[in-house]
């Protein structure tokens, strides 16, 4: 693969387990019909990779767009939550049938897995999803994942399959994610309006400047992502030690093209988290937040636990063991962790040293407000 990145870091041609996400604007045309010939080429790519020993998990958009056409709904089925739910109910049947047919033509077995946000935010359900995907892969099936838009609401949903792909990659134990998209990577500015915009072939760190380059616009208006969602997905994946690439999906056989010729944008993971820490890194919802001072922020980056003395503000109604966000002096997200105290006790001791806490709490304090073993930096 070009881009001068060692294969050990990420190479879609040799990555042992890969998640491939396909957006609605690629899979469905403007009339709400599957782009059958293009998708058959993608499946041929997937079959070729499977034959080479690579395990594949697919995250497929398109259910709402397909269902909207069949139901005659305006705005691609996205005029209201109720329309989207109805369109998804109809379109998911059609989408599963398309994948089953095309994968079967390559001698592969499709397995449909519909997920809600809660399935991957709740630790026990997350582990169940991970076990199901692992067993399907062991049996030689190709899991085809999608958000269960029929029951998801605006308050409890991923909202885009880019972030779902990153989260599913953690559950699947994947080492790479490819987002097939109608754009060919992250640019320094919007290339449609700025002729000087340059594509970034490799991103080693998601700095504020990089984050600012992403917008929420979608090229087709059919999907729900945009570059902002893709960069957020890259951050989620990277926090769990998973590399993510945005690849131009508008060409024939896009996975083969990407493996042979490079292109796109590759986001390298800054760290290698596994197990509970990978799950924490990918969390979207939290029960509260802990704002810390500069000294605590520096200590966390050195691998220390979060002590109450370094906390300046506690927000939310969380219980001990709930997931909380850890926020830096400038309001930036530093990480997530499992709270060592209920919110009321955390408020009572924030800013206090350990030897001052027992009198406030009425019991012996714990070693940390968030222990390093239960904390992951983002």
Image: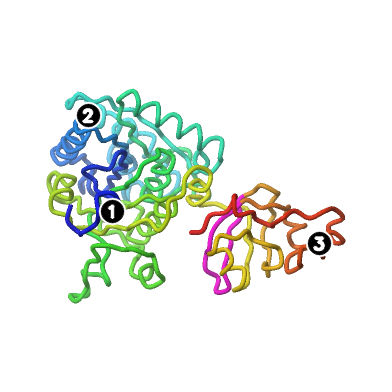
Taking the magenta stretch, the answer to whether it contains residue 325 is yes
Q: Main secondary structure of the magenta part?
A: strand
**How many C-alpha atoms fall within 10 Å of the one at disc 3: few (<14), some, or many (≥20)?**
many
Q: Nearer the viewer, residue 297 or 355?
A: 355
Q: Which residue position is annotated with label 2? A: 103
Residue lying at 39% horizontally and 48% vertically, measured from the top left: 166
Residue lying at 74% horizontally and 62% vertically, measured from the top left: 347
Q: Where does the image place residue 356, in percent across and percent down from the top left?
A: 82, 65
Q: Are marks 1 and 2 in contact (CB under 8 Å)?
A: no
Q: How is the image coloured?
A: rainbow
**How many C-alpha atoms fall within 10 Å of the one at disc 1: few (<14), some, or many (≥20)?**
many
Q: Quick check: 57 above or below 260? A: above
Q: Nearer the viewer, residue 27 or 232?
A: 232
Q: CA distance from mark 1 to mark 2?
A: 24 Å
Q: Which residue position is annotated with label 3? A: 357
Q: Secondary structure at mark 1?
A: strand
Left or right: 360 in relation to 235? right
Q: Which residue position is annotated with label 1? A: 245
Q: Quick check: 131 above or below 277? A: above
Q: Are marks 3 and 1 in contact (CB under 8 Å)?
A: no
Q: Quick check: 184 above or below 274? A: below
**Residue 87 lies in what quarter of the image?**
top left
Q: Which label lies toward us, 3 or 2?
A: 3
Q: Secondary structure at mark 2?
A: helix
Residue lying at 37% horizontally and 45% vertically, measured from the top left: 165
Magenta highlight range: 323-337
Q: CA distance from mark 3 to mark 2?
A: 61 Å
């Amino acid at each position: 693969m070009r881009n001068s990145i060692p294969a050990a870091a990420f190479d879609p041609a040799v990555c042992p387990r890969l998640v491939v996400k396909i957006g609605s604007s690629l899979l469905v045309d403007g009339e709400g019909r599957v782009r059958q010939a293009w998708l058959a080429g993608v499946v041929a790519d997937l079959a070729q990779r499977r034959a080479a020993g690579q395990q594949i998990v697919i995250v497929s958009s398109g259910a709402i767009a397909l269902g909207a056409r069949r139901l005659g709904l305006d705005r691609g089925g996205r005029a209201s939550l109720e329309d989207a739910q109805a369109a998804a109910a109809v379109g998911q049947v059609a989408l599963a049938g398309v994948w089953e047919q095309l994968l079967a033509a390559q001698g592969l077995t499709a397995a449909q897995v519909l997920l809600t946000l809660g399935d991957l935010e709740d630790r026990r359900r997350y582990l169940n999803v991970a076990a199901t995907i692992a067993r399907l892969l062991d049996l030689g099936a190709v899991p085809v994942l999608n958000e269960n838009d029929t029951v998801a609401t605006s308050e409890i949903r991923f909202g885009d399959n880019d972030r779902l792909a990153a989260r599913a990659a953690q559950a699947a134990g994947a080492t790479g994610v490819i987002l097939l998209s109608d754009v060919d990577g992250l640019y320094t500015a919007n290339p449609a309006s700025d002729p000087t915009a340059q594509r970034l072939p490799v991103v080693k760190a998601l700095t504020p400047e990089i984050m600012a380059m992403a917008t929420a616009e979608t090229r087709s208006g059919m999907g729900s992502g945009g570059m902002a969602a893709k960069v957020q997905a890259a951050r989620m994946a990277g926090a769990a030690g998973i590399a993510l690439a945005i690849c131009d999906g508008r060409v024939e056989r896009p996975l083969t093209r990407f493996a042979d010729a490079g292109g796109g944008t590759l986001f390298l993971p800054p760290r290698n988290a596994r197990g509970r820490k990978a799950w924490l890194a990918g969390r979207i919802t939290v029960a509260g937040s802990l704002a810390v001072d500069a000294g605590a922020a520096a200590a966390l980056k050195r691998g220390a636990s979060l002590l109450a003395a370094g906390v300046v503000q506690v927000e939310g109604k969380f219980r001990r063991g709930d997931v909380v966000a850890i926020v830096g002096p400038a309001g930036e997200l530093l990480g997530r962790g499992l709270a060592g105290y209920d919110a009321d006790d955390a408020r009572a001791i924030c800013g206090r040293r350990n030897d001052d806490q027992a009198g406030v709490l009425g019991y012996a304090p714990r070693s940390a407000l968030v222990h390093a073993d239960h904390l992951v930096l983002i």
